[in-house]
Image: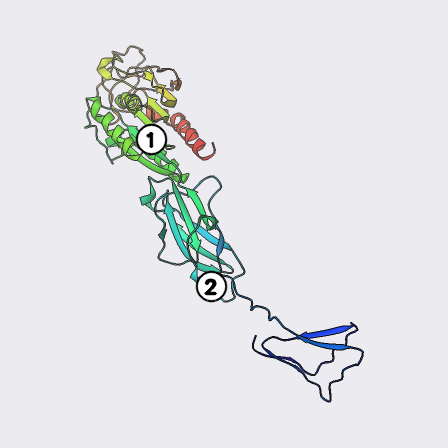
Amino acid sequence: MAGNILKTGKVITKTAEKITMSAQNGDLLLNATKKIKYATQKELVYGSYIAPKPQQTKNLLVTKVICSDCEKDQGVQIGKTYTFKATQFSRKPKAGGHELKNVKWAYQIDNGEIQEFKKPGRIIGNSVVKKIEIPESLWDNKSLRVYAYLQNPGKKASVECLITNKVLVVFYHGGPMGDGETKTDTSIESSGYTGPAYERTVEFIKNKGMNLRSVLIAPAAVQYFGVKTGKDFIFENYNEGDKIIIYGYSYGGDNAVNLAESIGDIPVDLLIIVDSSDGLGRGLTVDTSISDNVKLAYNFYQTAASGGFSRSKSSDSDNPNTSENSSSDGSSNSMGSRGFPHSTEGKAKVHNIRLTAEKMSHGEIQNLGKDNIQRRINERIETYICP
């Protein structure tokens, strides 16, 4: 260390046998107002001096990142905005935020490439905050990792959030006079009482904050087309862990059962069958066996073989051949329309619930039984939140 070591205007009192003062690469100056005295009994030793190394400021690193408003074990949901915070650092950041303003943010989808966010976070106290909206584009992915860093992103300064599983909903209304394609008109005039049931289910799932993909299908005279539409929808949207709910009324009930069977090993969490019927077939072509990939099935049925529009009167007869007039909209029923008990092929848990309210009929079962039916649907959806 070049330069001088100075002791000015101070008295040094020592009782030790020796006072050692040393300097290296410089001068050792002893200054006094009058004179410097040396006691004969003591010795003043001049030796070497090793200057201390100047203290270096360590590079600032982010050591902890959190998601402050992510619920434990719930993950993040599509369409919502979450707050991520860089809360801990390798040392105390310098005052004024000059270092914290250099904190960068990046993200990684599943095990893909790490990509940097263009906009920086916001400094709040000794933390840096970044609000991130989970976009629609992440629908079919499983995880999102968020990084905060000053030099290079690393897992030690990141947080991984699971993108919560989706609920896939497939509804079939009644009547075989559709084209087997999806439809958007959920009015009673177009889709019968299945339309409002579909809307209630979709709204309940959305209100619970869950990711949702849903479709309403109009059955065709040939079941292949409606089943194929539902099957394509599931194959396009399903990821492992997603929940599948299938609902079918009347002719659509048979479509629902066949759809569940057609998707093989993909699990159907809930199957709702409402008075599954083939009309003129008098139940001869109705598939009443529930495949093993279905976890839980509720079969709601009535035995008054009524016909006509949804407000048709019920028949006192249990004869499936008796009927009133029929129509072809989503709530119609043809001659002999009534439901039948269903059974499991082995693994599915099947509940047959016969509805016997006053004025119960094939056309009115979704309306008169809506509270009972919707309660079972909602109860099952609730388990997706608190298993």
317 horizontally vs 66: left or right:
left
Label of residue 197 in the image: 1
Q: Amino acid at mark 2?
A: Glu
Image-based side of 282 in relation to 95, left or right: left
Q: Where does residue 162 sit, x and y in percent of width and height?
A: 42, 41
Q: Nearer the viewer, mark 2 or mark 1?
A: 2
Image height check: is 323 above or below 95? above
148 or 140, which is in the foreground? 148
CB under 8 Å between callouts 2 and 1?
Answer: no
Q: Which corner quadrant of the image does residue 140 belong to?
A: top left
Task: Kindly identify which residue carries mark 2.
Answer: 99
Residue 133 shows in the view? no
Rate crowding at label 1 as few (under 14), some (14 to 19) or many (20 or more) other CA atoms within 10 Å. many
Residue 177's x, y, as percent? 19, 25
Classify mark 2: residues with Cα within 10 Å, few (<14), some (14-19) or many (20+). few
Residue 305 position in % (x across, y down): 28, 15
Please name the colour scheme applied to the rendered image. rainbow
Label drawn at residue 356: none
